[in-house]
Amino acid sequence: MSEKPTNLAEQFPEGDRLKSFIDRRKKMGLVWRLIFQASTIIAIIALVSLLYNIIVGAFGFVAVQNKVDPASLVLTVEEERMLSASNTFSSEDDNELVAGIEANPNAIGFFGYAYYIENSAKLRAISLDGTMPSAETAESGEYPYARPLFIYSTPDILESKPQVAAFTNFYLSQVNDVIEEIGYFPLSEETLAEAKQNLLAALGEDPAGELPPVNPAELGAEPITISGSSTVYPVTRHMAIAFRRAGFTGPLDLEQTGTSAGFQLFCNGDIDIANASRPITRAEVGTCQEKRLEPVEFRVSTDALAIVVSSENTFLQNVTLDELRQIFTTAETWAEANPAWPDTPIERFIPGADSGTLDFFTVTTFTRSLDDLPKETLLAMLENNISPGLLRRYEAEGPMAERTTEEVLNLVKERVVEQRVVRSWTLVESIFKRAEIEAEVAEIPQAELEFRSWFVPRFLTTPQASVPEFAGIRTAIFGSLWTIFITIIIALPIGVGGAIYLEEYAAMVGNPTLRRINAIIQTNINNLAGVPSIIYGMLGLAIFVRAWEPLTSGTLFGAADPTTANGRTILSAGLTLALLILPLIIINAQEAIRAVPQSLRQAGMGLGATKWQTIWSHVLPNAIPGILTGNILAVSRAIGETAPLVVVGASTFITVDPASPFSKFTTLPIQIYQWTSRPQAEFRNIAAAAIIVLLILLLTLNGSAIYLRNRYSRRMS
Amino acid sequence: MSHYQHELSSNGKYALELRDLHCYYGSFCAVKNVNLTLERQKITAFIGPSGCGKSTVLRALNRMNELIPGGRVEGKVMFHDQDLYDPEVDPVEVRRRIGMVFQKPNPFPKSIYDNVAWGAKVNGFKGNLAELVEQSLRQAALWDEVKDLLNQSGLSLSGGQQQRLCIARAIATRPEIILMDEPCSALDPIATLKIEDLMRDLVRNYTIVIVTHNMQQAARASDYTAFFLMDRDDRAGELIEYGVTNEIFTNPKDKRTEDYITGRFG
């Protein structure tokens, strides 16, 4: 106290000082607000990047490589069916086929259109779905047994090698004059003009103009190398001979390797011209572009098959694709394929197994994809391609007759085609680096690019497998659910009970020694919540797995799983996790019980209710929302635990669903942990998918707890 | 049934008799040496400044003090010639016979019906619950207001209604004595008057002990008044003066009582 009383009101800031003082305090508040906002944003970013990581891993392109090409597998099966059909005569010599058909009104066969033309006096071509083979219907694709023939080159080659440009020019100018000789259809004027325009454009000239005349004799002795399709080969050979006759002196190297191999050489820059019996694929263009090659396409002709009968045949004018399939496979008589036809046996004349014509016919007639095959065909494939022992094993697991087509298809894919994912890409790579991925896949033999979601229903319903694309998490989901169920039924009552004792009774204990013990217990529970989970695993191993083995293995009850019969069971895992989350549940339940207003307890007791009546009727119902919240957190932690379960002895490779608490087990986090530590990238993809499942499982459990909590809260107020 | 039930007819003079009552929280003596007899079917008011121990004494009357960790009572509280603090006496039975209404209305977060019925249920009531609930609500002058809302939560009522619900809840166990710890301190004047009217009605059947800060309320509503004050030296509350309300307010014998009721302190 000072002598002279000062005016204390003057000690507060006033006027401008007041204003700046308030501003300063507000700025301080703003800084804190920004700090809090930043923390929230960091948390959100962390969560989003976690989700991003998972989703990017769970979806994306994969390169699927088949050890056996499924198309050729289908082809083999169908060709076999055709060749083994009754009354079937097969020969590599088309003349034998012609001879067989010509005088037989019940005969049918097919071969290149050229042979039909040669023998049109004795034979009659029939229409397919109303379409007769002709130059027009073949070129437009209306007639299905027709395929376009091409040659390919690039503007660079055409410009830098005048002999290649001249040969192409010669080819396009003359091909229509000689094509029928070779047995293929000539092109229409428009299509040929288009090919010529392509050449002019590639040479950097006006596409509307005329091709310049060619004089091969004036060209130097520079080489031309050509390779590719064996179907185009005779045409190109014919043109090459004519080119040389016209005076070309350089070496002309012409090979037949097949269309795909031809493109590979071409895109590698090894040849000047590629012969092709199909258009170039996107992937092949990608491979070419990597070498800075821009393929230019020139259509040169159309190839077609004729389906023929004897000229003495009176009933067959037209067939449908369906009828054709039956005629060449299952049908014994004509009437079986179509009741309008006579009931006489079909006599089939088809090209031999080594013939490309048979392949072309089969590919066009029958479906090319495994997915479209009937179950019977798939079963036949399985029987032909896997060992009888393996087949018996599958039969024992589930009779083939009872399996669905899809299951059989998966078996075929796994065992016969041996489909493997050889490379996978993340979602982001798949979206932004598509061209690079396609080019990469093109270099992998027999590989196909496929967009795959690893998170599919099959993933949930199949057990673990050694191949990532056939592995699932069914066993792990059941293991997790069982374990968590046991954890909850043990930890929840014990934890809540302990919390009730500590909150409601321990404080009222009069005895000082007991009070001290209670205080020590309380402190220890708080500390236990922070003990590393691996310690709980060691405890679980020592007590539940080893010491309590008769109990946890079930031998005590005579319920032991014959495959396990040791303590490494779901029960041990559940008990261990229950121990782990017990402190969390107790602490959270204590908080919830403490939050119940004291006045409610007094009101209850004041009415003459006993302590327990008051706790049961008023304290617990009001604490349940809080207890459930704590339980959600604790159970979420238990679901995600890996380390203690590794110690307790979770199986990392198990394909049998757990059947009881005494079964051996695996859980989702164990599975994820095991997959992420594998070297192949595909395991990380399925790990990501499994994480999504784990998150969904957590969300479901939490959601139901939140629902329960809200229902209770509503009832309370 | 009860071992003091038969005493009711033989000794009807006092509802409760406090003999040398000392109340402790841990080692701290909060109230010392209270001797007091409470008349049957009368309203007795405990008044005094904050911290004088009047609530503690009230809570000692149905053994609510021992629910607070460290709470302990010495001395005797005689009820039908039986000491409530006798080791043989169960506090649960004491609280059934001596009900309590608290300072802040504290209905259970349950329906109005359950609020009233719960106490009877836990005490083994075998009769018609609906009838008991209706009668209790009528006695608490709440029936007309809530008879159509019996399934609504007790918390949906206004403060005054909630407090009357708490009174109905207390009388549903048919106690002999109702202890009221500042029942109107959280209420507006109109609700306060309603409670006071209710007390006048109830006192025909029950003995009521009320703690109040409001001296007008004590003067208006009570038959007897006990004045408590904290001893300056040991901070323990003690009973200064007790008598008929009129006497205390018009002709206090103790100087300190006079100072308090005339507003010189407190």
Image: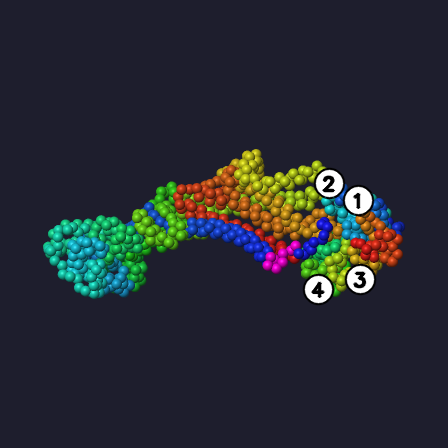
Reading the image, the residue beneath label 3 is B197
* Residue nearest the observer in this picture, B136 or A267: A267
Q: Which residue is found at the position 52% from the left and 43% from the top?
A: A641
Reading the image, the residue beneath label 4 is B148
Q: For mark 4, does the 10 Å Cα neighbourhood hold few (<14), some (14 to 19), or many (20 or more) residues?
A: few
Classify residue B252 by image quadrant.
bottom right
Against A451, residue A543 (above or below) is above
How far apart marks 3 and 4 lie (CA) works out to: 23 Å
**Contact between labelled residues 2 and 3, with CB atoms less than 8 Å apart:** no
Q: Main secondary structure of the magenta part?
A: helix
Q: Magenta stretch containing residue A97, yes or no?
A: no
The type of residue carrying mark 1 is Asp
Q: Which residue is found at the position 38% from the left and 48% from the top?
A: A424
Reading the image, the residue beneath label 2 is A510
Reading the image, the residue beneath label 1 is B234
Q: Which residues are magenta?
A: A11-18
Where does the C terminus of chain A fall, quadrant-wise? bottom right
Residue A324 as seen in the image, left or right of residue A709:
left
Residue A657 location in percent, x, y?
A: 49, 44
**Contact between labelled residues 1 and 4, with CB atoms less than 8 Å apart:** no
The type of residue carrying mark 4 is Asp
Chain ID at mark 4: B
